[in-house]
Image (tube, helix red, strand yellow):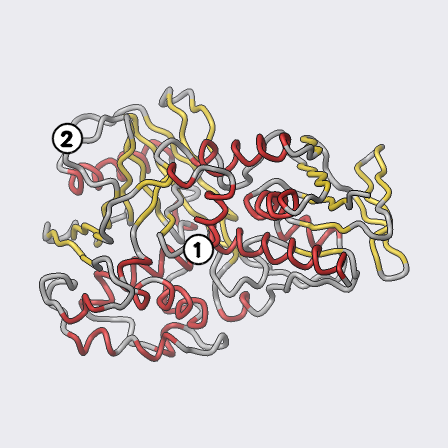
Amino acid sequence: MQKIVHIIGAGISGLSAAIRLANANYRVNLHEATQQAGGRCRSYFDAATNLTIDNGNHLLLSGNRHAVAYARSIGTEAGLVGPKRAQFPFVDLTTGQRWQLDLGERRLPLWVFDEARRVPDTGLRDYLALMPLIWAAQSKRVADAIPCEGTLYQRLVQPLLLAALNVDPPEGSAGLAGAVVRETLLAGGQACRPLIARDGLSAVLVEPAIKLLRDKGASIQFGHELREFSLSAGRVGELKFGTDTVTVAPDDAVIMAVPPRPAASLLPGLKTPTKFRAIVNAHFRFDPPKDMPPLIGLVGGLVEWLFAFPQRLSVTISNGDRLVDMPREELAQAIWRDICKAGGVQGELPPWQIVRERRATFEATPEQNALRPGAVTDWKNLFLAGDWTDTGLPATIEGSVRSGNRAADLALAMRQA
């Protein structure tokens, strides 16, 4: 008899768990409270720009093994596109200086020995000063591990860690920052090629997964919000979706892949992060110049990363709490000024859209990181997934996929026990 796993939540963590289990010939029942899959990682048609845009600009790297393997498993790895070499153009909006960080194609970070490929005005000693961060304890802040000042910090470490942690880097978890550095800068250019879903996140990471699951006989229900677990004898016995109650058989498993707030309400006593930070994304309908790189790092301005897509320019601003209540048009104008400087473009403000996510990620400080639960719960057939669980990484797509894989593996192991 085919074994059943109920997955609550159709974000990337829930989808990755579902694909892993469906490929292992398990019956997957996927329950999603909203009317669409993808969670914070999805695309939608925007009337203001008359374009399909992503609700957030998510950058993957070639070294994100789990995320790339997930895309491969649903047949869309080719939809993640990027340069052949790990090259990152930067511009300082204050001085106008431009440079390119060239991490090369190797497994080792040999680029730090080549002045032409490093951040300008930095030496080998500056990079060696980052070493304490690599194996820093989870309880330490970044500022406790490395000096948060100087040219290398301002031009590379600060923008890298700000994007990864979504907090001001000095207050961020040194343990999480160290994991990021180990898997990127320390892993050489082979792990650092930027990969972007040029056709949209949903087209590459979400819709093909839903189609594959349906082709494998999975049940997928949207607008199906879990209201309550029935817990007894150390396991989940029933799932209550309003007027709809689903019985969980003794050998069946449940994976809860929902955000921390609903997770905590469904499982009283569950330890979860309690503080969150905003991310602001902006999209402009504008044809990028033909020679514009797909990604530009910006230093010294409001914007941190500029993405060039067909027919639009998009930006991301991390740690964006200060901007969530700013008047929308004023914010759009300020962002557009940064884009014009960085991209060498000009013109009046084109059609635009601002997407502000107030609770985009958990606050990646040591205190909040310590509140992240593991995948195992007090109930032997219930497992957790989500980028807010203890993945060893900040809240990223890679962390989401790892958490889904981990929960799926625990469900598989439960069957074999």
How many marks are shown on the rendered structure?
2
Mark with earlier residue (2, 1): 1
Q: Is residue 192 left or right of residue 260?
A: left
Q: Amino acid at mark 1?
A: Arg
Q: Residue 186: x and y, percent?
A: 31, 68
Image quadrant in which the N terminus is located: top right
- Given residues 337 and 417, the one toward you in this image is 417
- Given residues 187 and 391, the one toward you in this image is 187
Image quadrant in which the C terminus is located: bottom right
Q: Secondary structure at mark 2?
A: loop
Numbered tag placed on residue 65 in the rendering: 1
Q: Residue 132: x and y, percent?
A: 34, 80
**Crowdedness of circle 1 by 10 Å Cα count: few (<14), some, many (20+)?**
some
Q: Amino acid at mark 2?
A: Gln
Q: Is residue 335 left or right of residue 292?
A: right
Numbered tag placed on residue 346 in the rendering: 2
Q: Is residue 361 left or right of residue 243?
A: left
Residue name at image x 38 percent, y 78 percent: 144
Q: Secondary structure at mark 1?
A: helix
When asked about the image quadrant of residue 280, the answer is: top left
Q: Residue 94: x and y, percent?
A: 15, 52
